[in-house]
Amino acid sequence: MTRFEIPDMTCGHCVKTVTEAVRSVDPVAQVQADLATHSIGVISNANAMSLSAAITAAGYRNTPSA
């Protein structure tokens, strides 16, 4: 699982937008969001750089972590 810290993810709409961004790269990706820590966990065959780029393109700063 790849984790992303997303400081600007603060509500359900943000979670939906970030999830859609991840799934634009990998339609079957599993996304687990945690609003309390402003982070998501992603299980995907796509690499972290591609996922991060999609999240950034959706308007959210993010930092991937292992």
Image (cartoon, rainbow, N blue to C red):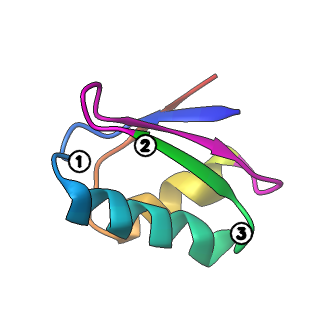
Residue 15 figure quarter: bottom left
In the rendered image, the vertical position of residue 40 relative to residue 58, given as above or below: above
Residue at label 1? 9
Say which of marks 3 and 2 sits in front.
2
- Label 3 SS: loop
Check contact, mark 1 vs mark 2: CB within 8 A: yes
Residue located farthest toward the right when viewing the structure as drawn:
45
What's the residue type where badge 2 is placed?
Ala
Magenta residues, as a range?
A: 34-47
Quadrant showing the C terminus: top right
| Residue 3 rendering spot, x and y as whole percentages | 55, 32
Total numbered labels: 3
Q: Is residue 52 left or right of residue 55?
A: right
| Residue 21 rendering spot, x and y as whole percentages | 48, 70
- Label 2 SS: strand
Looking at the image, tell me whether mark 1 or mark 3 is earlier in sequence order: 1
- Label 1 SS: loop
Q: Marks 1 and 3, how far apart in space?
A: 20 Å
Q: Marks 3 and 2, how far apart in space?
A: 16 Å
Residue at label 2? 33
How would you rate the neighbour count of disc 3 (Cα within 10 Å): few for under 14, some for 14-19, many for 20 or more? Answer: some
Q: Residue at x 59, y 56 (%)?
A: 51
What's the residue type where badge 3 is placed?
Asp
How would you rate the neighbour count of disc 2 (Cα within 10 Å): few for under 14, some for 14-19, many for 20 or more? Answer: many
| Residue 48 rendering spot, x and y as whole percentages | 65, 45
Q: Residue at x 39, y 61 (%)?
A: 18
Looking at the image, tell me whether mark 1 or mark 2 is earlier in sequence order: 1
Q: Is residue 32 left or right of residue 16?
A: right
Residue at label 3? 26
